Amino acid sequence: MIGALLMLVSGLVFAMSKSFAILLLAAVAGVISPNGKEIGPFLSVEQAALSQLVRDEDRTRLFAWYNLVGSMATALGALGGGWMVQLLELRGVPAVAAYRALLYAYAVGGRTSSSVLGLSQQVEASEKGGQREIQRTLGLHRSRGMVLRLSASLPLILSVGV
């Protein structure tokens, strides 16, 4: 739900703002993909949920189809977005306004993504019989140290321009 809300807000900010600082904040804190591939919070949640729903022996085939369908959806989305902008420009809409309309459509997609509330409880990780509760911080266990070190290095990486 938070990811869908961030997608909605960042889409609206990109559609309405002209301030570089505000756009930069929305790009960093929001869910705006710099390319056609999903790199936001949805990818890991989807993959974790899918792995809970299928048998081990079917998982590879499922993820092959998952990636194929995702790539096709990305291609169709790029094609549809390009056509939408071109159609609006042909009707006399300035290019900036046409791209803003596309960003509003993106924000609506974020609102639509909130349909995750209708997911089955089967997508949740189940407790394996008798295992003791593992201490977690922010949902992390063994990888916590590495994730925190990488997260701490992000400002340095951004300041260098890598």
Image: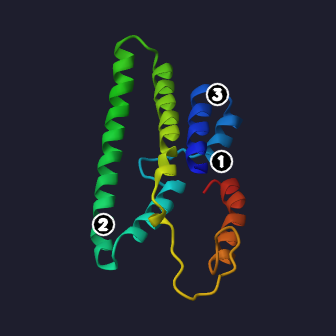
Crowding at label 2, few (<14), some or many (≥20) Cα neighbours within 10 Å?
some
Secondary element type, mark 2: helix
Sequence-earlier tag: 1 or 3: 3
Q: Where is residue 40 in the image (x, y as percent from the top left)?
A: 53, 54
**Which residue of the protein is positioned furthest toward the top in this rendering?**
92
Residue 106 in the figure: left or right of residue 154: left
> Pointer 1: what residue?
29
The residue shown at (60%, 43%) is 5
Secondary element type, mark 1: helix
Give the residue type that dot 3 points to.
Answer: Ser
Sequence-earlier tag: 2 or 1: 1
> Pointer 2: what residue?
62
Which label belongs to residue 17?
3
Residue 12 in the figure: left or right of residue 61: right
The residue lying toward the viewer, choosing from 35 and 5, is 5
In terms of image quadrants, where is residue 158?
bottom right
Which label belongs to residue 85?
none
Crowding at label 1, few (<14), some or many (≥20) Cα neighbours within 10 Å?
few
